[in-house]
Every structure is written in structure tokens, then in C-alpha cells.
Amino acid sequence: MSLNRAVATLGAVAVVGALTVGFSVAHANSVGKPVPKVYVTSGSTWVPISNTCYNDGKVLTSKQLAACVAKVQKIGAADTATPVKVHPNTTFTIGVDKQITDKGWSASGTGALVAQTTKYQANNLPLSGVFATNTDQSTGATTTADKGTVLIVERKSATSNDIYGVWMATLKTVS
């Protein structure tokens, strides 16, 4: 191979390499930060929950928070939150990525499941905190709903209005 041909080959490799690196850097910058994950586990069923509202780890603005509330209401009304199958009379676990535990989080259903902001995952949560119960006033009989919504909120304290993200799931009993 002649010297000119070797130089031309090296030049072509350098151009292809530069284009590849340039495209990779541009693509990496356009993707954004990874969104932290929330997981709900019941028995051997493990389900990842997609975020409902998230702002790249920054506090949701008042406009974003208003949109988030509307989105949560819409998902709740349409019953389109991520479904998680659970067995009656069991417990479930909420697990969160480290990015969420670094700030803290709380969870609620029909009542407070994890009332105080925690830096850990929550184990052995009762389904009674998710499923509503109704008592018939005339007979005294109690019935329990077969599904309920869990709302997980990333924030520094339970009383803080600074919300970083919201995740939503629907627990549904199976026989």
C-alpha cells in the first residue's frame, strides 16, 4: 500500500470516528436524565410503575403541579393507572430507586400508607390502606372494594409543597 493510500484510509477512519462520536454525544445530550423507577411487589408479582409527573429531578413548578393533579384525576377516572394484581388478605411492598430515597417519598391510598417521608422502601403494607370499605347502615354488613389506587410522591417531607415526582398504580385483587 502506498503512503498516500494509507494516509487517505486513516483520514477516512478519522472522519467516520468523529462523526460517530459527534452523533453519540448529541444523542446522549438529547435523551435527558434517567427517570427514577418505582416498583410495587405483592407475593412473586413485581411491577415497575411509570411516572405520572416528573421534572428531571427538579421541583415541579406550580403550573406543572396543577397539570399533574389534573392528570392524576384523569387517570383515576379512566382507571388507566398501572395495574398490580394482589391476593386478598396479603401485604405489598413499595420499592423506589435511590434517586427517590435521596430526597424522600410518601405514599397514600384510601388512607396514609407511608405517612412520613421515608428514605427506605416500605415493606408489608396492608391492603386495607388501599381498598375502601363500606358498611351497609341497615344490615351492618361490611364490603371491601376489589381495587384501589396507590399514589407515590417524591418530596423532602410529608408537609412539603416541593414535589419532585408522582407515580400512580391500581392494586386489583385476584382469586
Image (cartoon, rainbow, N blue to C red):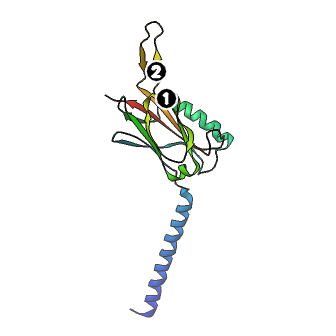
Q: Residue at x 64, y 36 (%)?
A: 66
Q: Residue at x 44, y 10 (%)?
A: 140
Tell me, yes or no, whether the two marked residues, 2 and 1, touch with CB atoms within 8 Å.
Answer: no
Residue 133: mark: 2
Q: What amino acid is labelled 1 in the image? A: Ala
The C terminus sits in image quarter: top left
The N terminus sits in image quarter: bottom left
Q: With 128 as the anchor, is 74 left or right in this view? A: right
Residue 17: mark: none
Q: Earlier in the sequence, mark 2 or mark 1?
A: 1
11 and 79: which one is in front?
A: 79
138 and 173: which one is in front?
A: 138
Residue 149, percent across and down? 48, 31
Q: Is residue 130 visible?
A: no
Q: Is residue 156 visible?
A: yes
Residue at the top extreme of this rendering: 138
Q: What amino acid is labelled 2 in the image? A: Thr
Residue under circle 1? 78
Question: How busy is the neighbourhood of tag 1: few (under 14 within 10 Å), some, or many (20 plus)?
Answer: few
Q: With 70 as the anchor, is 49 left or right in this view? A: left
Residue 36, percent across and down? 51, 50
169 and 96: which one is in front?
A: 96
Asked which secondary structure carries label 1, the reply is: helix
Residue 118, percent across and down? 55, 44
Residue at the left extreme of this rendering: 175
Residue 6, percent across and down? 43, 88
Asked which secondary structure carries label 2, the reply is: strand
Residue at the right extreme of this rendering: 62
Snapshot quadrant of residue 3: bottom left
Question: How busy is the neighbourhood of tag 2: few (under 14 within 10 Å), some, or many (20 plus)?
Answer: few
Q: Residue at x 47, y 85 (%)?
A: 8
Residue 138 higher or lower than 10, as above or below: above
